[in-house]
Image (cartoon, grey):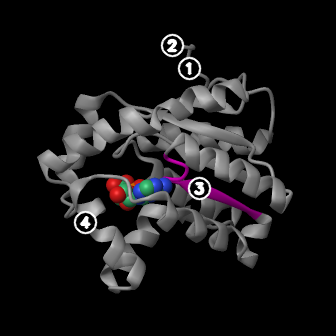
């Protein structure tokens, strides 16, 4: 059973890789960013509440995210595996997820950490042209990532779930490393994709 968390800064390529790996294993790609963007487009109550945070490159409050993720993981298609992309994004969200998975009697196989230097991210994001991708917002999103999300690297390292991937490589090479990881199943985390501890 493939259950993966994709961790990394905005623009690291998590979404692109998650789509391919999810398709290969016939499991849902659960992106909280995509769910929120649809809610904004449909002007639902959730969307209206989330919009200002997203436009400023801030995280939306946990109360908007936690129920959404719990409901999504309880859907039938998520029983046979999943890839979480963009969640958890704070230590508080990670602690919530840990207890949710315990209740669901599920275990995540690996947390894949996509490593990409900030300069590369800025130029990638500027080229993407999404409405929340103006330079000012991009810089704020990166700062929010370093302050609030990067601590999850240590959190999952302590739990021996972290596998690091160099995200500054061609899409196909990263994809191949992820395929090797998912075909091997849960293991020691000592893989060719493991970057030296920094
Ligand atoms: P993403 O597509 O994952 O970069 O998400 C786009 C935006 O949605 C982020 O900049 C946040 O405003 C919001 N968002 C997505 N996932 C989360 C999360 N787990 N916690 C808080 N905000 C989130």
Q: Mark 2 = which residue?
A: 198
Q: Mark 4 = which residue?
A: 52
Crowd rating for badge 4 (residues with CA inside 10 Å; few <14, some 14–19, many 20+): some
Callouts 3 and 2 close, C-beta under 8 Å: no
Q: Residue 53 in the image: x percent, y percent?
A: 29, 60
Crowd rating for badge 1 (residues with CA inside 10 Å; few <14, some 14–19, many 20+): some
Give the mark count: 4
- What residue range appears in magenta? 81-89
Q: Residue 121 in the image: x percent, y percent?
A: 28, 38
Q: Distance between the residues labelled 2 and 1?
A: 8 Å
- Residue at 75% across, 77% down: 76
Secondary structure state at the residue bearing disc 4: helix
Up/down of 35 relative to 87, above or below? below
Which of the two labelled residues, at mark 4 and mark 2, occupies the earlier sequence position? 4
Crowd rating for badge 2 (residues with CA inside 10 Å; few <14, some 14–19, many 20+): few
Which of the two labelled residues, at mark 3 and mark 2, occupies the earlier sequence position? 3
Q: Residue 115 in the image: x percent, y percent?
A: 44, 30
Of circles 1 and 3, the one toward us is: 3
**Is 193 situated left or right of 49 in this image?**
right
Callouts 2 and 1 close, C-beta under 8 Å: yes
Secondary structure state at the residue bearing disc 1: loop
Up/down of 126 relative to 24, above or below? above
Callouts 4 and 2 close, C-beta under 8 Å: no
Q: In which quarter of the image is the N terminus?
A: bottom right
- Residue at 74% across, 57% down: 100
Of circles 1 and 4, the one toward us is: 4
Of circles 2 and 1, the one toward us is: 2
Q: Mark 1 = which residue?
A: 195
Q: How far apart are marks 3 and 2 (CA)?
A: 24 Å
Callouts 1 and 3 close, C-beta under 8 Å: no
Q: Mark 3 = which residue?
A: 84
């Amino acid at each position: 059973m493939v259950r993966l968390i994709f961790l990394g800064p905005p623009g690291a390529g998590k979404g692109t890789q998650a789509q391919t790996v999810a398709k290969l294993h016939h499991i849902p790609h659960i992106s909280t960013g995509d769910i929120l963007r649809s809610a904004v487009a449909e002007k639902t109550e959730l969307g209206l509440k989330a919009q200002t945070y997203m436009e400023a490159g801030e995280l939306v409050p946990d109360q908007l995210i936690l129920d959404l993720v719990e409901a999504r993981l309880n859907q039938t298609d998520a029983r046979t595996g999943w890839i979480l992309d963009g969640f958890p994004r704070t230590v508080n969200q990670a602690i919530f997820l840990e207890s949710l998975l315990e209740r669901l009697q599920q275990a995540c196989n690996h947390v894949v950490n996509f490593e990409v230097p900030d300069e590369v991210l800025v130029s990638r994001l500027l080229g993407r042209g999404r409405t929340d991708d103006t330079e000012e917002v991009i810089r704020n999103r990166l700062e929010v990532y370093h302050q609030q999300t990067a601590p999850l690297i240590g959190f999952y390292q302590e739990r021996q779930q972290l596998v690091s991937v160099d995200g500054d490589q061609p899409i196909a090479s990263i994809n191949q490393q992820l395929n090797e990881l998912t075909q091997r199943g849960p293991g020691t985390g000592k893989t060719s994709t493991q970057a030296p501890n920094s």
